[in-house]
C-alpha cells in the first residue's frame, strides 16, 4: 500500500524555452527506505502517459497496481527491500503535478494553452531540485522506459556526478520522422476537436474528449505489435455478419477494443498534457548541443549504463537502442546491453518476461553490491 | 579456469582495452578485469550466458556477429580482440578474422583442432563424423560449422599476410608433449596471437 504525496518546490525553474516557473508542485510516491548512507535511491522516470503511481496499490480495493508493478517491489528487479524508489508525476502532467490544468497564479484561471512548452531537460532539472529537497545527493540509478529513458540519459549528461547508473529501456536518442508523424497526427486529432478551444477548453467548461480518444487510439496501435493484435483480435467480429443478404454494419473486435482504450484514457488524461508530452518527445535530441555527436555527448557521463530493447518494438526499434550502445562503447563507457525476445511490441517493457526480469534484476543487484 | 584462458592471458597487457567475441558467461573477461584491470566488453547472444555476465559485472553486449559483424566498432579501438572456441561456429570465419584485426591492434584466437588424431581415426576407420569428448556433437546438431586443422589456419594466415606473434598448443585430455611434437596430429586446442 502506498500513499502519494505532494512536494512544493519554491526555487524558480528557468525552462529551456526561457520562461520561468516561480514555484510548482510535484506529486510523488516512494517505495522502500532510504538507507543511512543515502546511497540507495532510485529515480523512476515515467513515459508519455505514466504518472507517479509506479507500484503498489493506493487502497485494498484498487483493481490495478502502479504501472511498473511487475518490476518494482520486494524481491522484484528494482527490489524495494534494497532500494529507496522514487517516482514522480512530471511537471506539465495531469495527475497531481503542476500542469495545464493547474491554476495560473497571475490570472487565477487554469493555465490551459498558456502553460509553457517543456523539454525533457526541464523535467530533469525539476527532478534535481526535488532530489535536493528529499536530501538525495546522488541516485544509485535513474531508470526509465521510452520517454523515461530519454530523461535518464539526459540526467547522465546534465548531472554526471549525481547518477551512478543510467538504465535506458526501449528508448532512443531522438525520434524518427515516422515517430514525429504519429505524434503530430495525434495532436491534430485533439486540436481539431471543436471542444478544444485552442487549448482553453476548461475556460469554456468543455473538453476535447473525442479528439483525445482518437489520439490515444493512434498511440495505442504503435505500442502493440502486429503479431499481438493478430493473436488478441484477429478478424473476430464483435457484431454484425457478412452473410449474404444482410445489410448489418459489421464491427471488428479490434475496433471496439481501441475505442474502449481511447474512451477510458480520455476520461482521465488531459489533452494539453498529451500535446505537451508528445512535443517533449519530438523535441528531444540527446546530442543536439554536443555537435550532434552522441559520442561527444556521452563523453560527459560518469555512470554505468544498462540498455535494453525488444525485438518486436517498432515504435522504439532495437536499432535506436543499438545506436545508444554504439555511442557509449565509442565513448568508452561501461555499458551492458540486452535485446529481449518478446511478442508485445513497445509495451513489452512494462510486461512480465523471464529474460528481461533476470537481466534487469542481475544488473540492479550489481548496483547494491558495488 | 579453462586451459586456453590460462595460456592466452599472458599476452594481455595490464590496463588494456579488450573485446571478447562470444564471451560466454564472462569468466575470462571477469578474470582479466580482476587480474589485469582491463577495460572491456564481451559480445554474446545466448540469453542465459548474458544473464551470467551481468551478474558477474561484465559489460556484455547482446550482439550477433553473423548478423551485424563488428561494423559498429572503430578501427584499432581495442588493444586486443579475443575469440575463444567460437571461430568454428561462424558463418564466415575468414571475414570475422579480418574484422577482428581491423578493430583490434592484436587478436587472440583459440579453436579446436579438427586434425587431431582422434578425429582422424573416427573418420578414417569408423567412417563417421567425429564425436568425442572434445567435440561432443552429432553432425546435424553441432554449432561448429567451419572446422579447420592447425595447418588450415596457418595457410589462411599466410594468404591474408597475417602476422603470427605467438602460437601455442594445449592439451587437456591427451598427452601435452606429443601435442607439442606434432601439433596438427596430437594438439587439441590452438591458441594464436595475431597482428596485422
Image (cartoon, coloured by chain):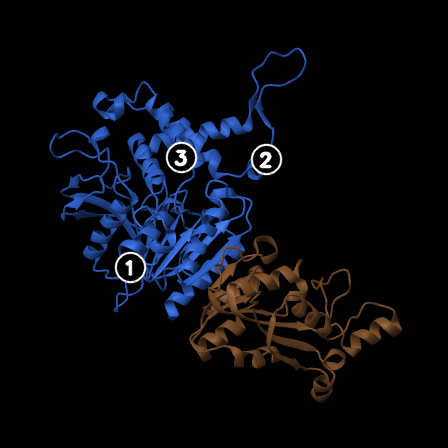
Q: Return the disc, 2 or 1, that comes first in the chain's sequence.
A: 1
Q: Residue furthest bottom?
A: B177
Q: For the residue carrying disc 1, how many other residues have a C-alpha within 10 Å: few (<14), some (14-19), or many (20+)?
A: some
Q: Nearer the viewer, residue B80 or A334?
A: B80
**Which structural element holds mark 2?**
helix
Q: Nearer the viewer, residue B31 or B67?
A: B67
CA–CA distance between discs 3 and 2? Answer: 25 Å
Colour in which the image shows chain A: blue
CA–CA distance between discs 2 and 1? Answer: 44 Å
Of all chains in the rendering, the one displayed in brown is B
Question: On what subunit does the disc labeled 3 rest?
Answer: A
Labelled disc at residue B156: none
Q: For the residue carrying disc 3, how many other residues have a C-alpha within 10 Å: few (<14), some (14-19), or many (20+)?
A: some
Q: Which residue is mark 2?
A: A230
Task: Kindly indicate the quadrant of the structure image that contains residue A102.
Answer: top left
**Which-is-in-front pick, marks 2 and 1?**
1
CA–CA distance between discs 3 and 1? Answer: 29 Å
Are discs 3 and 2 both within one chain? yes
Q: Return the disc, 3 or 1, that comes first in the chain's sequence.
A: 1
Residue in view at x 45 percent, y 50 percent: A323
The spot of residue B78 in percent (x, y) is 48, 67
**Which-is-in-front pick, marks 3 and 2?**
3
A26, above or below A83, in the image: above
Q: Which residue is mark 3?
A: A180
Q: Which residue is mark 1?
A: A160
Amino acid at each position: 500500500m502506498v500513499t502519494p504525496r505532494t512536494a512544493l518546490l519554491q526555487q524558480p525553474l528557468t525552462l529551456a524555452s526561457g520562461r520561468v516557473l516561480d514555484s510548482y508542485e510535484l506529486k510523488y510516491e516512494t517505495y522502500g527506505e532510504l538507507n543511512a548512507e543515502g546511497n540507495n535511491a532510485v529515480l523512476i522516470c515515467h513515459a508519455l502517459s505514466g504518472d507517479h503511481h509506479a507500484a503498489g496499490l493506493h487502497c485494498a480495493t484498487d483493481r490495478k497496481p502502479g504501472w511498473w508493478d511487475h518490476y518494482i517491489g520486494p524481491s522484484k528487479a528494482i527490489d524495494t527491500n534494497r532500494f529507496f524508489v522514487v517516482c514522480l508525476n512530471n511537471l506539465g502532467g495531469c495527475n497531481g503535478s503542476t500542469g495545464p490544468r493547474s491554476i495560473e497564479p497571475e490570472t487565477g484561471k487554469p493555465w490551459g494553452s498558456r502553460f509553457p512548452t517543456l523539454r525533457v531537460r526541464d523535467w530533469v532539472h525539476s527532478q534535481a531540485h526535488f532530489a535536493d529537497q528529499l536530501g538525495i545527493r546522488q541516485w544509485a540509478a535513474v531508470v526509465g522506459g521510452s520517454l523515461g529513458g530519454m530523461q535518464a540519459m539526459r540526467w547522465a549528461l546534465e548531472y554526471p556526478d549525481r547518477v551512478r547508473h543510467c538504465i535506458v529501456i526501449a528508448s532512443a536518442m531522438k525520434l524518427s520522422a515516422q515517430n514525429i508523424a504519429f505524434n503530430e497526427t495525434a495532436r491534430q486529432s485533439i486540436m481539431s476537436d471543436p471542444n478544444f478551444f485552442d487549448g482553453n477548453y476548461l475556460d469554456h467548461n468543455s473538453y476535447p474528449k473525442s479528439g483525445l480518444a482518437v489520439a490515444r487510439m493512434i498511440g495505442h496501435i504503435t505500442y502493440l505489435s502486429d503479431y499481438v493484435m493478430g493473436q488478441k483480435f484477429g478478424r473476430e467480429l464483435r457484431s454484425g455478419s457478412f452473410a449474404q443478404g444482410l445489410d448489418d454494419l459489421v464491427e471488428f473486435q479490434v475496433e471496439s477494443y481501441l475505442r474502449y482504450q481511447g474512451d477510458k484514457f480520455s476520461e482521465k488524461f488531459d489533452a494539453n498534457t498529451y500535446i505537451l508530452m508528445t512535443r517533449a518527445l519530438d523535441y528531444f535530441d540527446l546530442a543536439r548541443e554536443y555537435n550532434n555527436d552522441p559520442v561527444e555527448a556521452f563523453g560527459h557521463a560518469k555512470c554505468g549504463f544498462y540498455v535494453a530493447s525488444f525485438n518486436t518494438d517498432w515504435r522504439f526499434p532495437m536499432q535506436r537502442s543499438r545506436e545508444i550502445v554504439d555511442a557509449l562503447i565509442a565513448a568508452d563507457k561501461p555499458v551492458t546491453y540486452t535485446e529481449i525476445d518478446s511478442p508485445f511490441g513497445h509495451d513489452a517493457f512494462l510486461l512480465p518476461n523471464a529474460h528481461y526480469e533476470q537481466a534487469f534484476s542481475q544488473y540492479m543487484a550489481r548496483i547494491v553490491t558495488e | 579456469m579453462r586451459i586456453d584462458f590460462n595460456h592466452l592471458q599472458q599476452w594481455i597487457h595490464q590496463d588494456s582495452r579488450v573485446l571478447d567475441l562470444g564471451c560466454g558467461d564472462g569468466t575470462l573477461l571477469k578474470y582479466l578485469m580482476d587480474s589485469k584491470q582491463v577495460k572491456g566488453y564481451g559480445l554474446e547472444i545466448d540469453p542465459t550466458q548474458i544473464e551470467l555476465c551481468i551478474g558477474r559485472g561484465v559489460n556484455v553486449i547482446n550482439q550477433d556477429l553473423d548478423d551485424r559483424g563488428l561494423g559498429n566498432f572503430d578501427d584499432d579501438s581495442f588493444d586486443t580482440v579475443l575469440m575463444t572456441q567460437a571461430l568454428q561456429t561462424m558463418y564466415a570465419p575468414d571475414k570475422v578474422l579480418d574484422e577482428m584485426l581491423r578493430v583490434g591492434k592484436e587478436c587472440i584466437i583459440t579453436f579446436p583442432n579438427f586434425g587431431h588424431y582422434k578425429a582422424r581415426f573416427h573418420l578414417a576407420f569408423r567412417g563417421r563424423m567425429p564425436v568425442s569428448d572434445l567435440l561432443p556433437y552429432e553432425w546435424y546438431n553441432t554449432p561448429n560449422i567451419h572446422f579447420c586443422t592447425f595447418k588450415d589456419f596457418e595457410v589462411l594466415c599466410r594468404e591474408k599476410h597475417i602476422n603470427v606473434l605467438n602460437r601455442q598448443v594445449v592439451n587437456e585430455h591427451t598427452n601435452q608433449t606429443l601435442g607439442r611434437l606434432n601439433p596438427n596430429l596430437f594438439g587439441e586446442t590452438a591458441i594464436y596471437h595475431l597482428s596485422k
